[in-house]
Image (tube, helix red, strand yellow):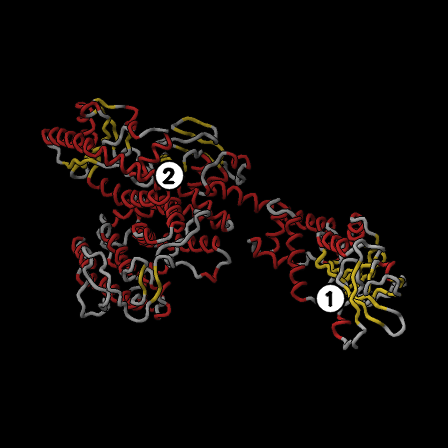
């Protein structure tokens, strides 16, 4: 199914399932009557595609025809057919948003791959690629796939299957873990990535059935992750289509306008290209050079990107007119002969000449590029390459399968995956968090490279801007550590010299020297060199940082007044390790000592965790009752109370609920103490059987006539300085403290019963709100008594 991601993160999720692309299972066999791309399928979904008696759908027949073209045996073709029958049965309850049976999606993925490669195991895995994730209820397991098909098929299917959602705590972590899983599977078998890229390409082709926000999120992820991966593998044709599809959804207005401009120029372009093709064919035929010559259309995204980058208008583009000359055979010399012949006919623009045959691109691309003043004085771009170079340019790493007599030897492919191994080394050594990993992955994928040579002539690919130190670490970690001098093209150069394409680099080590310089981190460009240098000093400084981190944490605990809580116990600190993405306590201490994590951050996290645990338990000792010696008796008028319109009745404010001016109140006629004033919600009034006539309506005068005692219950952490913070807060509110009692609990919290003198309930509520703002005050509520 379509991959899932968030547009903001613009980060890859190598999973294969997206609820937006499928409507989920139906009840039993599909009864959907809609025709499915009539030109392609001509079938109704009432049929049982998994039934061996049913004929193969036309798309699968085309796929088999491709296998025949690649010379695949009949027995191996049966593996692909068996995978289709199995997947069709397991997916029989699934349909996509466009109404098609789900099985046609993996079949399309396999068809895309079969245009590149005739590998029956890979095609079987492509057809099965969603079964492990989406058909668990149908009994699909890794072991069953392995036994029913082959272990390699099962491993490839597992490689493109994303991790379970239960294995990660949030979306970013799921993306990171699933991406790591796919890249590790890729390192074992590159076919995993080829399936994933084909899966993404078909999903991009059918993106119109999703919501706009999903279209844009998936398109952004395609530009950020999958198109660069295709570029790394030299798969130009697939990369171009991925980019154009993403361009269509991310910048729809620009896409539409550029499409219209290209369409308007098509007649003019076709005429000039036809004239140029004819001229080049005639020229090369006269010289006896067998070749094919055809016009080459640049894809829309590359045109738009060049216009944006160079601030050009459409009419200012010089390479809309382009030819590709593909020479029969594999003689590189013929390419240079053709270049000379074309330059003899048309005036070249020499600054546009690029020789990617003598100096191939890092992804293996080889070709000669030149721009000449062609027919009607129009700039004309010409690419010249051999047939094998053309296959490699279009199909990239997949083309290596075409030139292997068997599928067992992938040494040439392995050489082109150094960037992947470096990426995996970086992840192992740095162990970055999920967000840092995703950002590092994106950076590593889009980094351009230079090709340099060892003194023996071996080619080495390094990031643009690399230095001899990057070169040394690429040779071996120990060589990097002990390098002390470098030569580039036979001349001694500083170690921070920037390397260029074609440079011959040699480094010299000092025996016994194993310490890299910290200064190298300021100029190395490769992730491998930087991570190795940092790893060296992390290990060297580890013990010092551990001791420093412990000391810094103890100081912060004391500064925060939390020493008596004993928050820095090893048990408490271990609970933080998953949140901080650390493996053990020593790593935590070292991170604090290095300054990667602040001691305040650790103590604050411990405090928050402790408070959360307290609130979940609520296991705090209750405070004992407090008896006030302050008289709360007088006349109704002296307290601003009006009872039945009378102000001279003898009253007293009830101690059980401590009413304050502004509280809803009632009067209760006692037997010997006059009228008791209670809050209307007082539990004493609510719980008693009141005799008729003993409850009197009461209300406050408009303005308070006296100062009242208000009681608040506070639940707090028992830290140093908290009592001072409480009294200072009350004073700042211009309120006097009339009494305070503290009861300590075994869990290092305390209950405070605070009595204050206030003129109204509003004033009491203001004090309550201010107290809640004090750090480590967990709860403040109105007391129900003195």
- Quarter where residue 67 is shown: bottom left
Callout 1 secondary element: loop
Mark found first going from the N terminus, 2 or 1: 2
Q: Is mark 2 on a helix, strand or loop?
A: strand
Q: In which quarter of the image is the N terminus?
A: bottom left
Quarter of the figure with the C terminus: bottom right
Near mark 2 (Cα within 10 A), the count class, few <14, some 14-19 or many ≥20, is many
In the foreground, 711 or 364: 711
> Would residue 558 be found to the left or right of residue 581 on screen?
right
Q: Dot 1 corresponds to which residue?
A: 620
Pointer 2 with pointer 1, Cβ within 8 A: no
For label 1, count other residues whose C-alpha is less than 10 Å away and answer few (under 14), some (14-19) or many (20+). some
Q: Left of 248 or right of it: where is 529?
A: right
Q: Which of 442 and 519 is in front in this view?
A: 442
Q: Mark 2 points at which residue?
A: 461
Q: Where is residue 491 in the image (x, y as percent from the top left)?
A: 41, 26
Q: How far apart are the two marked residues, 2 and 1, measured between alpha carbons?
A: 65 Å
Quadrant in the rendering for residue 614: bottom right
- Relative to residue 415, is residue 743 drawn left or right? right
Q: Which residue is drawn at 23% across and 40% down?
A: 389
Give percent across and percent down for residue 403.
22, 48
Q: Can residue 750 be seen at all in this image of the molecule?
A: no
Q: Residue 584 carries which label?
A: none
312 sits left or right of 478 in the view: left
Q: Is residue 732 above or below residue 510?
A: below
Give how far across and how far down residue 399 sits, in percent: 25, 47
Count up the numbered dots.
Answer: 2
* Mark 2 or mark 1, whichever is nearer to me: 1
The answer to whether one can see residue 148 in this image is yes
Q: Report x, y in % for residue 130.
A: 34, 61
Residue displayed at 62% across by 44% down? 595
């Amino acid at each position: 199914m379509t991959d899932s991601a968030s547009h903001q993160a613009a980060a890859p999720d190598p999973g294969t399932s997206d609820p937006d692309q499928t409507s989920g299972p139906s009840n039993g066999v599909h009864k959907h009557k809609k025709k499915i791309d009539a030109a392609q399928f001509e079938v109704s979904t009432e049929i049982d595609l998994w039934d061996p008696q049913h004929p193969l759908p036309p798309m699968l027949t085309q796929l088999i025809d491709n296998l025949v073209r690649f010379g695949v045996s009949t027995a191996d073709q049966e593996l692909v057919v068996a995978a289709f029958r199995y997947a069709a049965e397991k997916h029989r309850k699934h349909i996509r948003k466009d109404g098609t049976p789900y099985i046609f999606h993996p079949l399309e993925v396999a068809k895309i791959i079969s245009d590149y490669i005739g590998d029956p195991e890979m095609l079987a895995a492509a057809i099965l690629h969603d079964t492990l994730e989406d058909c668990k209820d149908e009994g699909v397991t890794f072991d069953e796939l392995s036994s029913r098909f082959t272990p390699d098929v099962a491993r490839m299917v597992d490689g493109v299957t994303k991790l379970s959602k239960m294995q990660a705590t949030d979306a970013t972590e799921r993306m990171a873990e699933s991406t790591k899983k796919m890249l590790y599977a890729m390192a074992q078998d590159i076919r995993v990535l080829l399936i994933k890229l084909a899966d993404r390409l078909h999903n991009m082709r059918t993106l119109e059935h999703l919501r706009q926000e999903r279209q844009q999120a998936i398109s952004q992820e395609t530009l950020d992750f999958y198109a660069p991966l295709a570029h790394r593998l030299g798969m130009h044709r697939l990369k171009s289509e991925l980019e154009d599809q993403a361009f269509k959804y991310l910048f729809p207005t620009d896409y539409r306008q550029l499409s219209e401009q290209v369409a308007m120029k098509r007649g003019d372009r076709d005429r000039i290209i036809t004239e140029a093709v004819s001229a080049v064919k005639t020229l090369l035929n006269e010289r006896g050079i067998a070749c094919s010559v055809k016009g080459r259309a640049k894809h829309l995204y590359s045109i738009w990107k060049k216009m944006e980058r160079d601030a050009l208008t459409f009419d200012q583009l010089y390479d809309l007119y382009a030819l590709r000359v593909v020479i029969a055979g594999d003689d590189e010399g013929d390419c240079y002969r053709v270049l000379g012949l074309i330059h003899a006919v048309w005036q070249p623009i020499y600054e546009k000449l690029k020789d990617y045959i003598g100096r191939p691109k890092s992804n293996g691309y080889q070709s000669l590029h030149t721009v000449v003043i062609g027919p009607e004085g129009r700039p004309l771009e010409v690419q010249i390459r051999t047939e094998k170079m053309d296959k490699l340019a279009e199909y990239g790493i997949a083309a290596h399968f075409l030139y292997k007599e068997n599928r067992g030897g992938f040494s040439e492919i392995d050489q082109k995956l150094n960037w992947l191994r470096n990426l995996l080394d970086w992840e192992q050594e740095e162990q970055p968090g999920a967000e840092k990993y995703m950002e590092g992955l994106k950076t590593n994928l889009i980094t351009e490279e230079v090709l340099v040579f060892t003194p023996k002539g071996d080619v080495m690919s390094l990031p643009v801007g690399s230095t001899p130190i990057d070169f040394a670490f690429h040779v071996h970690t120990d060589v990097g550590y002990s390098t002390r001098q470098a030569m580039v093209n036979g001349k001694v150069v500083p170690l921070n010299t920037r390397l260029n394409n074609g440079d011959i680099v040699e480094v010299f080590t000092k025996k016994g020297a194993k310490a890299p310089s910290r200064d190298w981190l300021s100029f190395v460009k490769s992730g491998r060199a930087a991570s190795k240098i940092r790893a060296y000093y992390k290990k060297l400084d580890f013990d010092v940082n551990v001791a420093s981190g412990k000391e810094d944490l103890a100081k912060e605990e004391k500064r925060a007044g939390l020493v008596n809580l004993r928050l820095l116990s090893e048990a408490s600190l271990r609970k933080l390790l998953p949140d901080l993405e650390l493996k053990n306590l020593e790593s935590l201490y070292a991170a604090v000592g290095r300054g990667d994590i602040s001691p305040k951050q650790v103590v604050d996290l411990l405090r928050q965790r402790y408070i959360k645990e307290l609130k979940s338990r609520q296991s705090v000792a209750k405070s004992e009752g407090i008896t006030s010696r302050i008289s709360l008796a007088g006349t109704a008028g002296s307290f601003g109370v009006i009872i039945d319109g009378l102000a001279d009745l003898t009253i007293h404010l009830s101690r059980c609920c401590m009413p304050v001016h502004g509280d809803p109140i009632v009067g209760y006629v006692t037997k010997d103490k006059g009228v008791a004033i209670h809050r209307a919600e007082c539990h004493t009034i609510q719980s008693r059987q009141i005799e008729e006539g003993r409850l009197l309506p009461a209300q406050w005068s408009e303005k308070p006539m006296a100062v009242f005692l208000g009681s608040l219950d506070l639940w707090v952490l028992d830290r140093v300085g908290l009592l001072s913070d409480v009294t200072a807060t009350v004073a700042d509110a211009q309120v006097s403290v009339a009494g305070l009692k503290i009861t300590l609990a075994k869990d290092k919290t305390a209950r405070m019963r605070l009595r204050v003198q206030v003129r109204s309930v509003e004033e009491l509520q203001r004090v309550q709100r201010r107290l809640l703002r004090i750090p480590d005050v967990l709860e403040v509520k109105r007391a129900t008594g003195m």
